[in-house]
Amino acid sequence: MSEELKKEIEELKKKLEEAEKLKNEYLAGWQRARADFLNYKKEELERLGEMVKYAGETLILKILPILDNFEIAEKKLPEDLKNNENVKGILQIKNQILNFLKEQGVEEIKSVGERFDPNFHEVVEEVEMKDKEPGTIVEEIQKGYKINGRLLRPAKVKVAKKSN
């Protein structure tokens, strides 16, 4: 083999090594960029899910006062109107709202007869009662709700206090 041919082969080997090195560098950079993009995409989907959940909770919080008014109306309904077909139809709307809320993961917070829990109840009044243990909820002023196990709105309650 001639000296010129050996030099040319050496030069080509160096260029090939350089090309291999660049290829590996570019491939590693591309793989990092792809991993970063996939992580970004995952984070954005989670953020979007949280936004949708938050928007849903906001809507539900706006529906709850309507449900409260149905509860009040039903409690104050005169006995002679309870079997009226028109009234039953209107109260069916309340049941539809309750079913919709259940489907969204909303559940009522149990109150009356339960021990006061500051995580789920808000005391609006303490009532002196001899036959109830202090801290027992004796009346619910406004229903409280949880959504998927988290507090959505605390129940407003009256609690028994120690009698003197």
Image: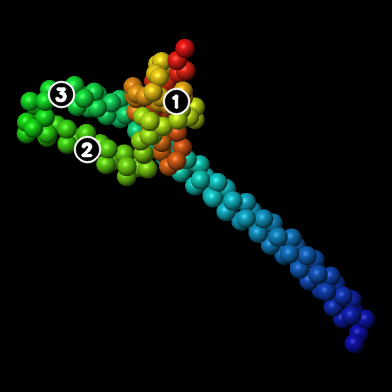
Report helix, strand or loop for mark 2.
helix
Question: Disc 2 or 3, which lies upstream in sequence?
Answer: 3
Residue farthest bottom in this picture: 1
Amino acid type at circle 2 is Asn
Amino acid type at circle 3 is Leu
CA distance for labels 2 and 3: 16 Å
Residue at x 31%, y 39% (from the top left corner) = 101
The quadrant of the picture occupied by the N terminus is: bottom right
Q: Residues within 10 Å of mark 3 (few under 14, many from 20)?
A: few
Instruction: Give the label on residue 95, or none.
Output: 2
Report helix, strand or loop for mark 1.
loop
Question: In this rendering, does residue 152 appear at all?
Answer: no
Residue 91 in the image: x percent, y percent? 17, 32
Seen in the picture, residue 60 relative to 32 is either above or below; the reply is above
- Marks 3, 1: nearer the viewer: 1
Number of residue marks? 3
Out of 24 and 71, give the one closest to the viewer.
71
Left or right, residue 136 beside residue 22: left
Report helix, strand or loop for mark 3.
loop
Colour mapping: rainbow
Instruction: Give the label on residue 94, or none.
Output: none
Q: Are marks 2 and 3 in contact (CB under 8 Å)?
A: no
Which residue position holds label 3?
A: 77
Q: Residues within 10 Å of mark 1 (few under 14, many from 20)?
A: some
Which residue position holds label 1?
A: 133
